[in-house]
Amino acid sequence: MENLLAFVIEDDKNLALAFAEALEEADYQVDVFFEGQSAKDSLEQRIPAIIILDLHIPNIKGTEILKYIRSDERLSNIRVIVATADNTLAKDLNSIADLVLLKPVGFKQLKDLAARLKPQ
């Protein structure tokens, strides 16, 4: 069986690579984006099963990407985990994200959550 696709959209390279590794250990194929425009462009071509999304990223903010995902019927089944240090913004997004995690996010925590959110 082919691994499901996951996107990590995070501008902190070390954190992005740690998130990617956690998703790979949960049996996802992972594409990493360090800014918003390339992630949005890729969403027009490919539909991942899950996205780990930072809110404060260059070019297109994470909040705009999340709104784009939720407004596009093609993308409606994507599970979005917001990973942010912005507690106030996190509370505002609880209703449209599948899950909001406050940074720092643990490796095992993310791996286990990603495995549980896999489509059946």
Image (cartoon, grey):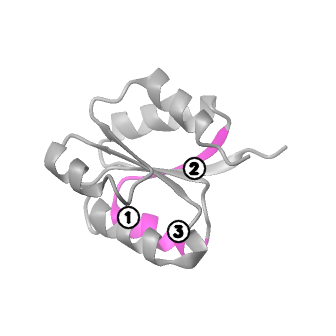
Q: Nearer the viewer, residue 17 or 8?
A: 8
Instruction: Count all numbered tags in the image, as a single digit.
Output: 3
| Residue 13 magenta | no
What residue is rendered at 24% in x and 49% in y? Answer: 90
The residue carrying mark 2 is 6
What residue is rendered at 40% in x and 40% in y? Answer: 16
Give coordinates of residue 32: x percent, y percent.
48, 50
The residue carrying mark 3 is 42
The answer to which image quadrant residue 60 occupies is bottom left
Tell me the amino acid under the disc marked 1.
Leu
Residues tagged 1 and 3 counted as in contact (Cβ below 8 A): no
Using the image, tell me which numbered label, if any, was put on residue 32. none
Foreground: disc 2 or disc 3: 2
Tell me the amino acid under the disc marked 3.
Ser
Tell me the amino acid under the disc marked 2.
Ala
Q: Give the magenta part as a residue range.
A: 28-45
Give coordinates of residue 84: x percent, y percent.
26, 43
What residue is rendered at 28% in x and 29% in y? Answer: 104
- How far apart are labels 1 and 2 at the CA level? 15 Å
Q: Nearer the viewer, residue 74 or 31?
A: 74
> Nearer the N terminus, badge 1 or badge 3?
3
The residue carrying mark 1 is 66
Q: Is residue 115 left or right of residue 16?
A: right
Rate crowding at label 3 as few (under 14), some (14 to 19) or many (20 or more) other CA atoms within 10 Å: some
| Residue 44 magenta | yes
Quarter of the image containing the N terminus? Answer: top right
Q: Is residue 120 left or right of residue 7?
A: right
